[in-house]
Amino acid sequence: MKKNRFIYRSLILGVFVLVIGYTLYINLFKEKNSLVQVGDQAPNFVLKDLNGKSVKLSDYRGKGVFLNFWGTWCKPCEREMPYMERQYQKYKDQGVEILAVNIAESNVSVKNFVDRYHLSFPIPMDKDREVTKAFGIGPIPTTVLIDKNGKIVKKTTASLSEKDIISFMNQIVPKEKK
């Protein structure tokens, strides 16, 4: 009888702990991942690239921005980079820019990665994760599409195929007003 009561109380306590844990998770982490929503103005930022040059998001106003958050250790990120480079070469003359924000890694490891994949688009370095926090980035890769007016068009954590990247680039090519 005592053993059954102990098991019953333990189960109730376990369920109670799970409910509290889930509630905390939803309130603390899920809200952070929704800081920026489709239709919001993208938060401006200034980061240094690998050469120490400032990269300021607002300097790209008038262009579509394919904003990608990544890390050298992230295999899906690694698969996307050659696709991104090929499409950058096609779309940069159409008013689309790629900013590939590296999250808190050393310049040496990022430089080696950039050299290996012959990347030519800007690589801002988010050493303190301030931009990552401002955009509510959770898992990587995460891509945020920003239109020519600085509005967020799409945010995805999916691993992108080259076909996806082409589709996304087409969504943010600045259109001429007639």
Image (spheres, rainbow, N blue to C red):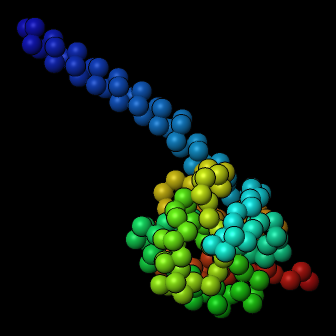
* Residue 82 versus residue 125 in the image, above or below: below
Q: Is residue 176 visible?
A: yes
Q: Is residue 142 visible?
A: no
Task: Using residue 121 as the reference point, say whether residue 11 is left or right of it.
Answer: left
Query: Which residue is located at x 35 percent, y 23 percent?
Result: 16
On-image quarter of the C terminus: bottom right
Task: Using residue 160 as the reference point, say whether residue 177 is left or right of it.
Answer: right
Residue 87 vs residue 4, the one in the foreground: 87
* Residue 140 versus residue 31 in the image, above or below: below
Query: Which residue is located at x 9 percent, y 13 percent?
Result: 3
- The spot of residue 175 in percent (x, y) is 81, 81
- Outermost residue, right direction? 178
Residue 122 vs residue 84, the one in the foreground: 122
* Residue 97 versus residue 11 in the image, above or below: below
- The spot of residue 143 in percent (x, y) is 58, 67
Task: Using residue 172 as the reference point, say whether residue 149 is left or right of it.
Answer: right
Residue 43 vs residue 16, the one in the foreground: 43
Query: Which residue is located at x 64 percent, y 90 percent?
Result: 89
* Residue 136 versus residue 143 in the image, above or below: above
- The spot of residue 114 in percent (x, y) is 53, 80
- Report how many numbered discs are placed on residues in the image: 0
On-image quarter of the N terminus: top left
